[in-house]
Structure formats: structure tokens, C-alpha cells
Amino acid sequence: MGSRSFDGANAARGLGWLLRARHDGLIREPLPEKWLELVNCLDEKERARLKAELSLPDSEGERPLKC
């Protein structure tokens, strides 16, 4: 039919372009404050979990974790 081949890579690029063109304004909006609070809360919980799991010292006087 045409001289150009239409493969999956071209389709993916075209779809990406269309999605960016349609949703660019939405993507650039800041996250709602409630979402930021949730992300920060989850981050704190994950840090505490990892700290407990790795038995990291709380104060500088304790021995450091050996790598």
C-alpha cells in the first residue's frame, strides 16, 4: 500500500504524542495537598520500617551499621 512501514514503535510514538497533546495541562498541575500529605506519611512509615528492619542506631553514640 504505502511506502512507509507502520510498526509497533511508530504506533507507540504516535500514541504517546496524542496522549501528551491531550493531557499536557493536567500533567503539569500540582498534586493536591491531601495527596502530598499521604505520600509524606507513607514515606515516613517506610523509613521507620526500613530503619527497624536494618536496626539502624538512633543516636550517634551507637555503633554504625556495617556494610
Image (cartoon, rainbow, N blue to C red):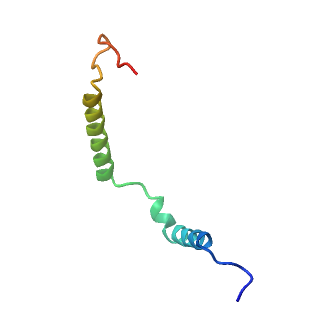
Question: 58 or 64, which is in the foreground?
Answer: 64
Is 38 drawn above or below residue 53 in the view shown?
below
Rendering coords of residue 48 (x, y %): 26, 33
> Image quadrant of residue 59?
top left
Q: Please state the total of marks drawn on the protein image.
A: 0
For the N terminus, the image quarter is bottom right
Q: Residue at x 35, y 16 (%)?
A: 64
Q: Is residue 52 left or right of residue 11?
A: left
Q: Residue at x 56, y 70 (%)?
A: 12
Question: 55 or 47, which is in the foreground?
Answer: 55
**Residue at the right extreme, as displayed:** 3
> Image quadrant of residue 17?
bottom right
Rendering coords of residue 20 (x, y %): 53, 67
For the C terminus, the image quarter is top left
Question: 58 or 50, which is in the foreground?
Answer: 50
Is 13 drawn above or below residue 47 in the view shown?
below
Q: Residue at x 46, y 61 (%)?
A: 27
Q: Residue at x 28, y 19 (%)?
A: 57
Rendering coords of residue 43 (x, y %): 31, 40
**Residue at the top extreme, as displayed:** 61
